[in-house]
Structure formats: structure tokens, C-alpha cells
Amino acid sequence: MTTSAPIFTDPAHLVAALRGDGYAVLRPQDVCALAGCAPAELAALVPSWDTLAIDNYLKDGGRYRRRRHSCFVQDGAALTQTPHRPHWQPLEYNALHGGMHRLFEAVEPEVAARPAWGQLLRALGRVCSSARGEQPWFIEAHQFRIDTTDGIGRPTPEGAHRDGVDFVAVLLVGRHHVKGGETRIFEADGPNGKRFTLTEPWSLLLLDDATVIHESTPIQPTAAHGHRDTLVLTYRAGRFQGEH
């Protein structure tokens, strides 16, 4: 099935959609309701995307990605930021950038300290526990800006992939003067797939990483300074990737 706009999930069926389809898509207002915060509180996070540092690890030589990265552990109602640590994925999940310890600049302290930040992370952790059982969640938070400085930007240069975690949350923070950036989801062990484009700020795609693979298509500018901003949160049981 191909759609130009996402088919949004009824929030009452969020966990059932994750279990049955492997993914769910929420409207911005439903994300706010889930997190218990006002739209203005999420909007207050947005200026921090203007301060992201260049990603110097891109093996394709591109300059189109900026990011910050921090890690947290959620245990019940408690959310604790860990000492800063590198991001690591095995080659089996990221053939392009796997096997490297990539140390990015941390999420700015004033951003991680905002109530809406913690409310959002904890709310999604509760959804993960509802779907997979109550347990501590090891969370990696990635702020991304993909820009079109060189004419094209690649949100997922590694192609269609899994992340090697339990759940992946992709929140669209904003799109400015770009076309493309279509989300594509495929069954990991089947023929079916979905295609749609997230356009509303703070709309959410939540994925069961064990059952689906995903990618976003390249973006191209429609005017100067075109870019696409996202917040990607991954939730993993047991430990962070790369820990033994």
C-alpha cells in the first residue's frame, strides 16, 4: 500500500498496532497527550536544532548531517542521563557506519533538563513496557539535522535498516524548503511495506525494530537553506549496544 500522507494510529490502539503491525504513527496532538505536555513546551525545544555540530563520521564524505547524541536509562518513573558515551552499532545493523565508536557532542544540558524532554522520553518508555513488559530501558537520543547544502541530503545513508534495539521512535521536528524525505517501512520477514511522508512537526513514527526495517529517502532543496530536523529515540532492553 502506498500513501502520500500517513494513516495515523488511534492512540487507544497504540500498543496493539506495535504488536500487530510492527509500527504506529501518532498525530502531534496525540504525542502531546501521551507525554502530558503542551505543544508550546515541545516547540521550545526546537531552537536547539540550530546548534547541532557537523557529523564527521559520514563515510560517503558528505557534509549534510548535523547531530547531537546523549544516553539515558529509564527504570520505572526514574529517568537518568548517563555519563557521555559514544554511539556504536554492529555491522550487521549498519553496514556503512557500524563497528565504529562515534563520539558526538552531547545534547545541550538545558535541553535535556526541560520538563517536556523528560516527559516525552518517559512516556515512550511506558509504551515500550506496555508492549514488551516492564523493565529498565537503555535510551539513546539523537538530534538530527539533514541539510541540502550540497544539493542533496540523506537521512539514512545506510539504506533500509534495523537499529539493533527493541523500539525506535522517530519524531519529525520540522521540514523547511525541502522535498523528499519519504518514510518507508518494510516487514523484516515478509513482502509488505508502507510509504508515507511525515509533514507535521512532532508527529511520531514508533517502530518495533525486531519486526520491521525502515529508511527515509533523500531530500532536495526547494529554496535556500533547506533542511529536515528529527529527534530519534531508541529503546533497548538489557544494556546499550556495545556493552558486555
Image (cartoon, rainbow, N blue to C red):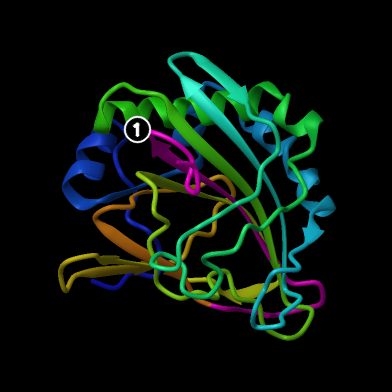
Toward the viewer: 161 or 187? Answer: 161
> In the displayed structure, does residue 177 sit left or right of residue 130?
right
In this rendering, is residue 229 above or below 239?
below
* Residue 77 visible, this orientation: yes
Q: Within the magenta stretch, is there residue 224? A: yes
> In the image, is residue 94 above or below residue 32?
below
Look at the image and give the residue range highlighted in magenta.
Answer: 218-244
Mark 1 lies on a secondary structure that is helix
Q: Is residue 173 left or right of residue 93?
A: right
Along the line of sight, the residue nearer the viewer: 140 or 218:
140
To which residue does mark 1 refer? 128
* Relative image position of residue 131 (x, y in whole percent): 25, 33
Q: Amino acid at mark 1?
A: Cys
* Quarter of image, res 191: bottom left
Seen in the image, is 86 located left or right of residue 36?
A: right
The number of numbered discs placed on residues in the rendered structure image is 1
Q: Position of residue 35 (x, y in %)?
A: 50, 26
**Is residue 183 in sight in this rendering?**
no
